[in-house]
Amino acid sequence: MNAFYKRFRVFFLNAGLFSIFINLALLVPSLYMLQVFDRVLTSRSNSTLLLLSLITLFVLLLSLALDYLRSQLLMHAGTTLDRLLGEKVITSLIEKGSQLNRSEEIHGLRDVAALRGFLGGASIIALFDLPWMLVYIALIFLFHPLLGLVACLGGLTLLALAAYNERTNRPAVESNQTDARRASHYIDQGIANADAINAMGMAPNIVAQWNRLNNRLLDNSLATAQRMGGVSSITRFVRQAIQIAMMTTGAYLVIDQHMSSGIMVACTIILGRALAPFESLIANWNNFVQARLAFGRLQHFFENTPPSAPTTLPTPKGQLSVDNLVLTSKSADRPIIRQISFNLTAGESLAIIGPSASGKSSLARLMVGIWQPTAGSVRLDGADMARTDRAQLGPHIGYLPQDVELFPGTIAENIARMGPVDSEKVVAAAQLAHVHELILHLPKGYDTPIGPGGYVLSGGQMQRIGLARALFGSPKFVVLDEPNANLDAEGEGQLLLTLKSLREQGTTVVLITHKPAILKELDKILLMREGRAELFGPRNEVFMKLKEASLPRVENQETGKQ
């Protein structure tokens, strides 16, 4: 909280200063009415009327200018907040998106947008004007204590309505936000899996499930809106009733000749101004609650001090050390990875094989540092992969995930990892991945756009371009998860040539595969079962042990045949 106010103190102090002059200026119409009723009408002086009118008009124009400047200042604060947090939030979302147990509290840029909208909206203006209610009521007390008592009771009544609105509707608004995110996430997942849904005729089931989630959201939102609408309507009625009570009390005092009719009119106008922020705040309560929740989720981004520049490490040679590696999910009694240890010298290559769900892809994520182990460590040239700065270590690592996704942009931009396109390095990576000729046959070659509205690549093409991306910049450590899953015989032959070239370059390679033909280009084999390292050693030695132990042959792992 303190960090937020320190960063935005200048905006709030200036907005508060503008609010002082704006609210003082808004007293002028009331004083104008007082002077017109008590002096102008009795003296019948046109010159006095003209002078008062010109002064009042000037002050109102000044108030208009200050109000505009205040709103622009707060909108600028919202823009500054977006620029301050946008990069941090996106970075956090990307980092947490790779975590094994993703937090459901990650709402990303929607929270930033909610705070930005709040800073530029009517709710925060009402907060700046709300303290002036005490000044206005005190001024009414100066005119007559009885009028001040009516104003005070009116303010307390609206305060009680605001407290009731907070206690009654805040939990419902928070629950509705959670339901809305759940429904949105469900349909996002559905769109991401549209091919499977359409192929298997799952659309009616998916739509029905979304309807259940959405109908629950609509019912709860409608009930909340009805309650909040009821409170808003009651607030408007109470405000008008208070003003009528003020007018009635003022008329009584005028009849009894305790004060003039000008004071009655002026106090009624001042009271209306005093109560206006309450009505605005209650009417926009939903935005206020959303902004408060968003601030709570984003608060740690304000408090985080910028990290100091990490110590620059030398370019790794590719020596890999995996020491007593353990990975557990929410169920600690069923580890995904169980105390795996092995070492690879720089330039060695390793094939990880084993049945499905044996932990191969999980081990790959641990080796490239996108997951943090529960215990143990993965070190590249002595540097802990899970704790080394990713921006520094990333260019020296190549990673091809099992499910390859490319980004909207050109082929060259994707191979260059969405950074500056170094044509020489891009072409070299494509040639190393033996995808150069394929790219040249695309409509615009390396400049072919992909993504929405762009060229549609096949699964095999995406995998081969993803391999080129993994090899961009000649990384010293490369992890390939099922790189031949979508390749035909020709593609597998080119992959073998790539592995041979990597060996000649002294690149350390870890490859996960179910296909035995590719193993001949690799030095060592790690056989995994149920998260354990069952066998590890040189390729021929592991094959010999498999044969001696009468274990299922590697080439038949997919079919389950002996």
Image (cartoon, rainbow, N blue to C red):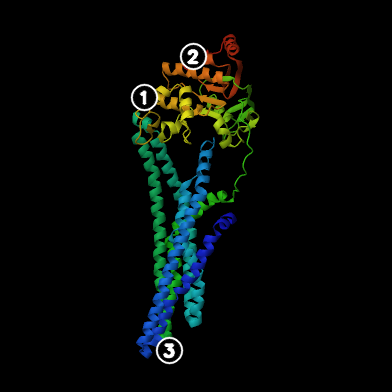
- Distance in Å between CA atoms under marks 1 and 2: 28 Å
Task: Residue 34: give x, y in percent of width and height.
Answer: 42, 82
Q: Earlier in the sequence, mark 3 or mark 2?
A: 3
- Closer to the camera, 88 or 365? 88
**Residue picked out by circle 3:** 256
Q: Residues within 10 Å of mark 2 (few under 14, many from 20)?
A: few
Residue at 50% x, 16% y is 518
Residue 497: x and y in percent read: 49, 17
On residue 441, the disc is 1
- Nearest to viewer (mark 3 / mark 2): 2
Element type at mark 1: loop
Question: Is residue 159 in sight in this rendering?
Answer: no
Specify the amino acid type for callout 1.
His
Identity, as a three-letter code, of the amino acid under mark 2? Ala
Q: Give the spatial CA distance, label 1 vs label 3.
A: 97 Å
Q: Secondary structure at mark 2?
A: helix
From the image, tell me which residue sits under label 2: 517
Residue 198 image offset from top left, x and y in percent: 34, 31
Q: Is residue 234 left or right of residue 475?
A: left
Up-down: is 543 above or below 364? above
Q: Is residue 361 above or below residue 288?
A: above
Disc with the residue nearer the chain's start (1 vs 2): 1
Q: Using the rendered image of the protein, determine whether residue 501 is visible from the camera's viewpoint.
A: yes
As displayed, is residue 241 above or below residue 186?
below
